[in-house]
Amino acid sequence: MPNPQNKKGLLQFYPHNLLWLGLSVLAIVLDQWTKWIAVSHLKYGEQNPVLPFLNWTLAHNYGAAFSFLSDAGGWQKYFFTGLAGVVSIIFIFWLMRMPKKMIILPAAIALILGGAVGNLIDRVSLGYVVDFIHVYYNNSHFPIFNLADSAITLGTILLLIDTFFLEKKRIQNAESAK
């Protein structure tokens, strides 16, 4: 008779991964807190110099990353809200099933999850995402972004590092253990 404790079903979670969910929650809290500060202290569109390459500039993003589809007529709000919701649920399940020895991949997933939920909160409650970090050099301006976008970007970089460098090592270690 099979031992039910050895089965790893779809809903099998590892308690140690609650720490990674904590990283997601931290990203959400910092994102929402900094957006609240920006909305409370900045005037829409007004550039507030911080460093020679950085302004605080309050902006509303009705689209996705870098205002992609921001002028699409309104359907994009529902699309991006639904997409972020579905991806967040998938990432929670994926994150909770991570083996204990993994560090880079769950950190990546946690950061992407936290960023996605941070922007999802804005999209659901406001109808747009609050952006305020404005990086530039001379007349070249990077699209205005927020901490959630930064968490997603950092998470994606970590995910790529894991995919292209660490996954091969895990496969080699698993094959040599056979």
Image (spheres, rainbow, N blue to C red):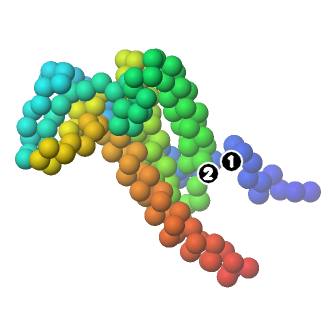
Q: For this view, does 45 lie left or right of residue 99?
A: left
The residue under label 2 is which amino acid type?
A: Arg
Q: Quadrant of residue 43?
A: top left
Residue named by callout 1: 12
Instruction: Characterize the local packing of mark 1: few (<14), some (14-19) or many (20 or more) Cα atoms within 10 angstroms.
Output: few
Residue at x 43% of width, y 29% of height:
69
Q: Residue furthest bottom?
A: 176
Q: Residue 157: percent from the left, percent from the top?
A: 41, 56
Q: Is residue 107 visible?
A: no
Q: Quadrant of the C terminus?
A: bottom right
Q: Disc 2 marks which residue?
A: 97
Q: Residue at x 11, y 47 (%)?
A: 138
Q: Position of residue 64 (x, y in %)?
A: 42, 33
Viewer-side residue, 163 vs 104: 163
Residue 61 visible at all = yes
Q: Amino acid at mark 1?
A: Gln
